[in-house]
Image (cartoon, grey):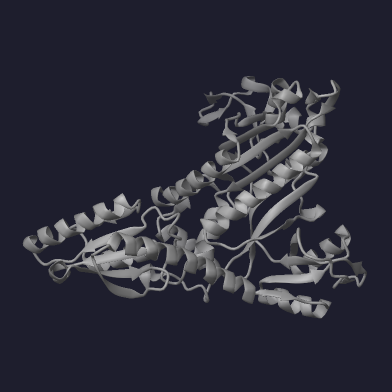
């Protein structure tokens, strides 16, 4: 097995951790709970960024940047917001170090204490809405559609690469609107953008829904979400979009003069996805042989490996390989010609298979004579011999097939692991098996908390669409209007 990877069946968590490090995606850093994203991993993240950034701009948003540090007093202005993030905040209290006169090394200079302590950004609503107060005076200044690419810090105690780290990368959109309807439409639109990206670029099917009050973003009136199912049967929140009402506008006194010449508070949204999507990508498609990447996000879509015994053969093979590479690049395909003379073809095959490159082309002297190449698919591990005539078109079509196949495979898995139950006994048994469990819920926070305490399952989402199906709560037996989706999650 490639690089001695633990199998998913033996230990899924260990498989994931090994895959992230052995595929050169990321590693733990000297700072507890923080990660180093390595070049190959960052290249995947850049592909995600580029696709999302284009989608944001196509929907009218522009990028800006706001400070990493937030005055502590800002957090006290929105009560539920501070309550939601208080336990995760890193706080800056001093601005200088000094040599200890008693020879104990470097210590904090107590004479350099900040007048007001600063919070290292866990999210930017407060600093951004304080800024918006200066930018918004009338309805002519609205809507304000801004996105920020940044890092944030949330002091997590139990961390895992990409899925939950003390510092991570993300984007956060923060928009301001003249009406409640416009803000709600924005929050719903961005959820659709996220779903489009995750399904059509990451090849991961998602459910769209609304979070329960217990799971809602701190400070939001409503939180919309997309939820995906990983191969171990756990759910992963892949993105959220929040309707903030006028909560932050009131907290930071952001008013505008409407068309009737009256002052009123602005309506707001915020929305974000993070490097957690990297975890979703890895866990949705990869197998016991290593990483599996959807072609749209793969840094290298095609790798060409030459097979030769001597310099003469290498020269002939290289000439043909470089012609193929050029043709593929003209087609817009990201291709690498691996002509390293320090590694044998077998090593290269294993390496690029482990790193999830969607298509591998092998070409040797006989292929040069016959105008053929051997093509291997990473998703199915199938091989085929293709004539080089119109090869760029054939490879382009193959990449589309791989993208589609990965999505269908993940969708089939989700469908096979989504269950509807109507009794508490059924619920408990099914949650142990994993997957999404549809069940009636009486709508109370108390019942939701009891279910979580007894099964470790949470309400992942309340469906946005669909007809009401009256029934009785699986836990309390009280009336319920519709099924909601439960799962254990990351």
- 264 is higher (above) or lower (below) than 179: above
Tell me: 393 left or right of 432: left
- 34 is higher (above) or lower (below) than 414: above
Residue 393 at what x, y percent from top left?
A: 33, 61
Can the viewer see residue 358?
A: no
Q: Report the residue at 65% width, 64% height from top.
A: 235
- Quadrant of residue 396 within the rendered picture: bottom left
Q: Report the residue at 11% width, 67% height from top.
A: 309
- Farthest residue, direction right: 478
Residue 375 at what x, y percent from top left?
A: 30, 69
> Could you tell me which quadrant the N terminus lies in?
bottom left
Tell me: 231 left or right of 386: right
Residue 152 at what x, y percent from top left?
A: 60, 40
Q: Report the residue at 41% width, 73% height from top.
A: 380
Say which of 101 and 296 sits in front: 296
- Quadrant of residue 237 within the rendered picture: bottom right
> Could you tell me which quadrant the C terminus lies in?
bottom right
Tell me: 363 left or right of 152: left
- 266 is higher (above) or lower (below) than 285: above
Count of numbered circles on the image: 0
Can the viewer see residue 202?
A: yes
- Farthest residue, direction left: 312
Say which of 115 and 232 sits in front: 232
Say which of 76 and 280 sits in front: 280
Say which of 9 and 42 sits in front: 42
Residue 328 at what x, y percent from top left?
A: 29, 55
Q: Report the residue at 62% width, 40% height from top.
A: 172
- 40 is higher (above) or lower (below) than 66: below
């Amino acid at each position: 097995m490639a690089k001695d990877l633990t199998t998913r069946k033996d230990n899924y968590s260990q498989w994931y951790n090994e895959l992230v490090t052995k595929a050169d995606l990321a590693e733990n850093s000297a700072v507890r709970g923080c990660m180093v994203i390595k070049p190959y991993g960052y290249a995947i993240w850049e592909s995600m960024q580029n696709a999302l950034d284009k989608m944001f701009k196509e929907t009218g948003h522009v990028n800006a940047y706001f400070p990493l540090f937030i005055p502590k007093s800002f957090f006290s202005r929105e009560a539920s917001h501070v309550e939601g993030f208080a336990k995760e905040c890193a706080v800056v209290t001093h601005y200088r170090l000094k040599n200890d006169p008693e020879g104990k090394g470097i210590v904090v200079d107590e004479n350099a204490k900040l007048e007001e302590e600063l919070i290292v950004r866990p999210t930017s609503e407060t600093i951004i809405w304080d800024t918006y107060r200066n930018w918004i005076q009338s309805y002519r200044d609205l809507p304000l559609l801004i996105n920020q690419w940044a890092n944030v810090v949330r002091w997590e105690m139990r961390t895992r690469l990409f899925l939950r780290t003390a510092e991570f990368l993300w984007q956060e959109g923060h928009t301001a609107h003249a009406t409640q309807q416009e803000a709600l439409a924005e929050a719903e639109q961005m959820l659709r953008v996220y779903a489009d990206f995750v399904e059509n670029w990451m090849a991961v099917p998602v459910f769209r829904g609304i979070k329960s009050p217990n799971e809602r973003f701190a400070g939001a009136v409503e939180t919309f979400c997309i939820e995906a199912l990983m191969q171990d049967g756990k759910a992963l929140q892949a993105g959220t979009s929040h309707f903030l009402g006028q909560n932050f506008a009131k907290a930071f006194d952001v008013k505008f003069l409407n068309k009737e010449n009256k002052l009123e508070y602005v309506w707001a949204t915020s929305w974000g996805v993070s490097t957690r999507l990297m975890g979703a990508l890895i866990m949705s498609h990869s197998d016991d042989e290593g990483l599996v990447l959807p072609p749209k996000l793969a840094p290298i879509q095609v790798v060409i490996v030459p097979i030769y015994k001597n310099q003469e053969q290498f020269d002939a093979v290289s000439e043909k390989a470089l012609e193929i590479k050029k043709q593929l690049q003209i087609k817009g395909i990201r291709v690498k010609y691996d002509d390293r003379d320090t590694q044998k073809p077998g090593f290269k095959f294993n390496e690029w298979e482990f790193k999830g490159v969607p298509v591998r082309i092998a070409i040797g002297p006989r292929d040069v004579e016959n105008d053929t190449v051997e093509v291997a698919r990473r998703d199915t591990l199938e091989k085929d011999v293709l004539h080089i005539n119109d090869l760029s078109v054939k490879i382009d079509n193959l990449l589309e097939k791989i993208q589609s196949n990965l999505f269908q495979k993940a969708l089939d898995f989700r469908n096979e692991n989504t269950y509807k139950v109507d009794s508490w006994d059924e619920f408990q048994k099914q949650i142990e098996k994993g997957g999404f469990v549809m069940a009636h819920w009486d709508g109370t926070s108390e019942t939701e908390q009891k279910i979580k305490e007894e099964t470790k399952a949470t309400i992942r989402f309340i469906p946005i669409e669909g007809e009401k199906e009256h029934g009785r709560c699986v836990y309390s037996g009280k009336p319920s209007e519709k099924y909601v989706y439960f799962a254990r999650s990351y």
